[in-house]
Amino acid sequence: KQDLAMRIAARLGAKIQTQTVHAVDDVCLSVASREVVGLVGESGCGKSTLGRVAAGIHPPSEGQLLWQGQPATNTREAQLKVQMVFQDPMSSLNPRHRIDRIISEAPRFHGQIRARDASDFAADLLQKVGLDPDFRIRYPHQFSGGQRQRIAIARALAVKPEIIVADEAVSALDVSVQAQVLNLFMDLREQLGLAYLFISHDLGVVEHIADRVVIMYLGRVVESAPTETLFDNPLHPYSQALLAEVPRLTTGKRRYQPIKGEIPSPLNPPTGCHFHPRCPLADGECRAKQPPLREIAPGHKVACHKVAEPKLQHGEQ
Ligand code: SF4
Ligand code: MG
C-alpha cells in the first residue's frame, strides 16, 4: 500500500462584483507517493486553480492542504515539496538570466546550496533532464521549446520536491517532443521517486502517464478511477464524451458521442448537476439536485444520478 503524499480538500472562491464564484467547489483530491494522478477537463473547469492550490500558490478559501496528514498550506516545507511546471516555459524563465542562475536561484534562496556551488549544481541537473551541462552558460532564447521545458523541469527539481504539479506541461510541444518529455517525466519518477499531479485537457496524453485519472467539470470532480478502468469503463456521461475525442488505436471506432455545446460560465453555473445542459441523459432530478461523488467500485468514484449503485447478485459477497 502506498503512503499518502498529499491530500487537498478545497473550495476556492473569488468574489467577482457581488457574487462568489467557485473555481473549485468542494473538491477532495489525494496523491500517493510515487503516484501519477492525471487531472483532466476542458479549459475553465478549475483544474489549473486546483493545481495552484496543491502547490501552495493559492490558499483555498475553504478547506485545507494536507501534507502527509499535516496541514501544509503556506508552509515553506510544503512549498518546496510541491513544485510546478507550466505550459509555456518561455514566460516562466527569465530571459535576462543565465540557465545556471535560473536553475540554482530557489535552492540558493532557501539556503540549500552555496553560491560557489551553483554552477556545478545546475550542470548536474541539466544532465539529469537530458541536456548538455555546458548549456548552463546560455540564455533561454537559445533553446527550442522542448529544451526549455527540460530546463523548467530541472529548475523544479532543484529544491528536491516530492510532487511535481505539471500544468499542461507538454501541451505546447510537437507530438514527437511531447513523447520525449513524457518519457523524461517517467524516468524521473523512477530515479527520484516523484509523484505527479499531471494536469491536461488531453486524455490521450494522460493515458500514457497516469496511474489514476480524475475528471473535473466546472469546478467539481465528476469521476475518478484507475487509468485502465476509466478508459475501459467510463461511467460519467462527461467522461464518455471526452473519451469520444480520443481515437482508439486498436479498433479505430468511436464508442461514445462527442460532447456538444460550450462549457457554461462558472459565474452562473447550471443548477443541480452542472453538466445537465450538455448531457443526453439529463432529467428533472439532474436539474434539481447535485449528484454526490460516490464510490461505486473499489477506487472508482462517479458523480451522476443515473449511474446505479452496484447491486449484489445471489452468491456474491
Ligand atoms: Fe447527466 Fe444527470 Fe448524470 Fe448529470 S446527473 S451527468 S445530467 S445523467
Ligand atoms: Mg489551465
Image: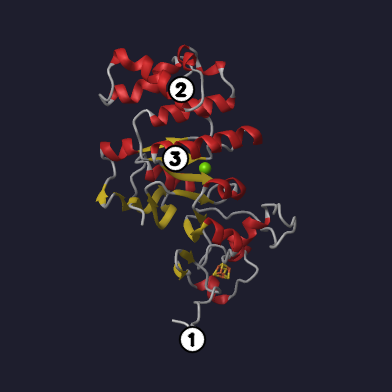
Q: Mark 3 vs mark 1: which is more N-terminal?
A: 3
Residue linked to disc 1: 315
> Seen from this angle, which residue lies furthest right?
252
Give x and y (percent) for residue 200. 54, 45
- Residue at 71 percent across and 52 percent down: it is 249
Identify the image quadrant of residue 159. top left
What kind of residue is marked 3? Glu
Tag in front: 2 or 3: 3
Q: Mark 2 vs mark 3: which is more N-terminal?
A: 2
Which secondary structure, mark 1?
Answer: loop
Which secondary structure, mark 2?
Answer: helix
- Dot label at residue 126: 2
Tag in front: 1 or 2: 1
* 3D distance between C-alphas at marks 2 and 3: 17 Å
- Residue at 53 percent across and 37 percent down: it is 169
Q: Nearer the viewer, residue 29 or 292?
A: 29
- Residue at 27 percent across and 26 percent down: it is 110
* 3D distance between C-alphas at marks 1 and 2: 59 Å
Which secondary structure, mark 3?
Answer: helix
Does any atom of ligand 2 lie closer than 8 Å to the CB of label 2?
no
Give x and y (percent) for residue 181. 55, 34
